Amino acid sequence: MRRRREKQTKTQLLAGSCGFVLAMAPLATAQEGGLWATLDLSSRLSVDDNLQMTAPSYGVTTSLDNVFAFSLMSRNSTEALTFSAGGTARAAQYPGGTTLVAIEDPSVRLSYSREGANSSFSVSGSYLLENLSFVDWTETVSYSFDDFLEFGTGSYSDWIASLGSADETSYLVSGGTRETLSFGATYEFGKGSPFGGSISASHSQAAYADANPAFEDGSTDRITGTARFEINPSLTGSATVDVSQTTSGDSTSLSQSIRFGMSQDFDSGLVGLNINTNLNGTTNASVNRSLEWSTGSVSFDLGLASTPSGSGATAGLGYQQNFKDGVFGASLSSDLASDSGTNTARASYRYEINDISRMSFAFSYTSNEPLGGGDGDYRAKISANYSREITDDIYVNAGYSLDFLDAADGDATFSNGIFVGIGRTYSFRPW
């Protein structure tokens, strides 16, 4: 069974603890074609005894978030046009009696896609303004092995590193806002053929206000071209050329990389080899292996890196086990550079109580330590959630989380948070 599974069309509401991002959301029912609308409404009451993650704690923060999301999609057999927008009506009380009543986290997205007999084209643009005080660091970037099995290819550690997790753990501590604007286009050809590929271009920019001074305004322009080829039904290869220009603060850098990959599909899983060369002087090579059985899978990889500043290594391990009424997943990864080491771990268990209710438990851990001595940054979170469907389109949920932070420039801190929520989804034809 190949790793490259097609993503199922679904409504996705990507949110942090209270932050809100609305992604493109085609409904499964919209496969019928025509014009469809979706309206998602939810209310969530949250209480946290140290939202600012300070030592000692400033006190309790209480917030009531009323999230609203709307999407409108027109679809036929070959084309789809989707507009979506959303935001959060937030009422919060901070320690010391300071209050906040505002419309926050506004987002807008417009996308268009067209499918041909053996090609496709898509273009999209989006805008989001986030209050970083309410972003959950474990949700902004997913290190989940489940996601890798569903959407990832190649090296597991390379895949999670590409998600860009370095800055995420500081958002909740620093607060402030982040304004993001992005747009891009992708053309894919040779779909279903022994030879094919894709070319894409994108632009993204971010601006911070009242946030951690380490976060600088910046932008990235990127052009990527990929060619894939099938030597035989089980042996495939790919070559990718990536050119990007990144501006951060007053500095601008140009990056050009070439990546080659080979993958052998066996009955029990995949074996892959990837080599990535950055023309600025960095080379990465990794080998990966996956094993699958009827109720689970395991994947591991090992990589070596050579950079102008020294050598490095990466390693990744993921495990998934399916049970009768639940699924357990765990992942580990390590990235050793010449001057620092980053380790991540994640574990989760989802249990289906019955047809309308379920529970989930999760653990996340991240460490970033300088090699050769010195203080590092450590962060962990444990959470438990319960959800129940009242009707087909009304649900309730509740949960608890324990956050831990031990930053190099501060004392260790803890934060306890609880929430209860209710939501409803409407799907209908406007006319």
Image (cartoon, rainbow, N blue to C red):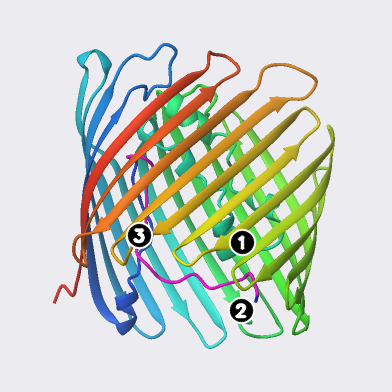
Mark 2 vs mark 3, CA separation in Å = 44 Å
Tell me the amino acid under the disc marked 3: Ile
User: Sequence order check: which comes first, mark 1 or mark 2?
Assistant: 1
The span picked out in magenta is: 2-18
Mark 1 vs mark 3, CA separation in Å = 29 Å
Q: Secondary structure at mark 1?
A: loop
Looking at the image, residue 273 lies above or below residue 373? below
User: Sequence order check: which comes first, mark 1 or mark 3?
Assistant: 1
Numbered label tally? 3
x%, y% of residue 276?
79, 54
Q: Residues within 10 Å of mark 1 (few under 14, many from 20)?
A: some
Q: Secondary structure at mark 2?
A: strand
Decide whether residue 12 is among the magenta residues.
Answer: yes
Is there a contact, CB below 8 Å, between mark 1 and mark 3?
A: no
x%, y% of residue 341?
73, 32
In depth, the one of 92 and 316 nearer the eye is 316
Tell me the amino acid under the disc marked 2: Phe
Q: Secondary structure at mark 3?
A: loop
In depth, the one of 149 and 219 nearer the eye is 149
Residue beneath disc 3: 353
In the rendered image, which quarter is residue 58 located in? top left
Q: Is residue 115 left or right of residue 307?
A: left
Tell me the amino acid under the disc marked 1: Gly
Looking at the image, residue 97 lies above or below residue 172? above
In depth, the one of 269 and 303 nearer the eye is 269
Residue beneath disc 2: 189
Residue beneath disc 1: 152
